[in-house]
Image (spheres, rainbow, N blue to C red):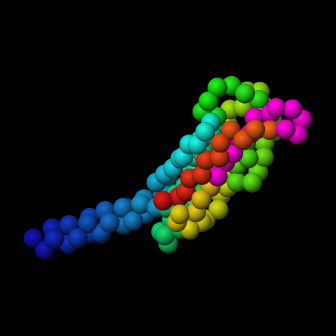
Amino acid sequence: MENIKRFGIVLSAAALTLVGVTAGTASASNSSTFGCTQTIVDYVKNTNNTYHVNWVMSRNVCGSYTGHFNVIGINNSDTNPIQAFKVYHSQDVGAETPFCGTGWRFNSPGNYTNMGTACTRVL
């Protein structure tokens, strides 16, 4: 009987260890939409209550237009049609850190219309 109890304790400890190891590896994401722009952030919660952000992406959720995105301060080139722009961030941040992306419609050289700035955050 004593061996069975000991075996049960070892299995329970192994299960807890497995849960502890895998709990910090689940990927999560959050998104927000404003105007024609949706911004998505993909992250993993670390064990020390910080978040490792893998990437931030903005994408067009309206009709087709020529333009570009500015995601966390980085512009991509004008494309026709504008679709999406993903920035690989790969940094640790604190909870509630905001990430924003803006869609810009090309009107003429040097003239753009803001199609929406969407901000989201890690939770």
- Dividing the picture into quadrants, the one containing residue 85 is top right
> Looking at the image, which is closer to me, 75 or 87?
75
Give how far across and how far down residue 61 sits, in percent.
60, 33
Give how far across and how far down residue 92 sits, in percent.
61, 65
Q: Is residue 110 magenta?
A: yes
> Looking at the image, which is closer to me, 50 or 19?
50
Residue plotted at (75% across, 38% down): 113
Left or right side of 102 for 20: left
Q: Is residue 55 visible?
A: no
> Looking at the image, which is closer to me, 35 or 42?
35
Q: Residue furthest left?
A: 1
Q: Quadrant of the N terminus?
A: bottom left
Left or right side of 94 for 73: right
Q: Is residue 75 magenta?
A: no
Q: Residue furthest right?
A: 109
Q: In the rendered structure, which segment of residues is drawn in magenta?
A: 100-111
Give how far across and how far down residue 55 sits, in percent.
63, 51
Q: Main secondary structure of the magenta part?
A: strand
Residue plotted at (68% across, 38% down): 115
Give how far across and how far down residue 23 sits, in percent.
41, 60
Q: Is residue 99 visible?
A: yes
- Position of residue 19 relative to residue 114, above or below, is below
Residue plotted at (87% across, 32% down): 108
- Position of residue 37 relative to residue 25, above or below, is above
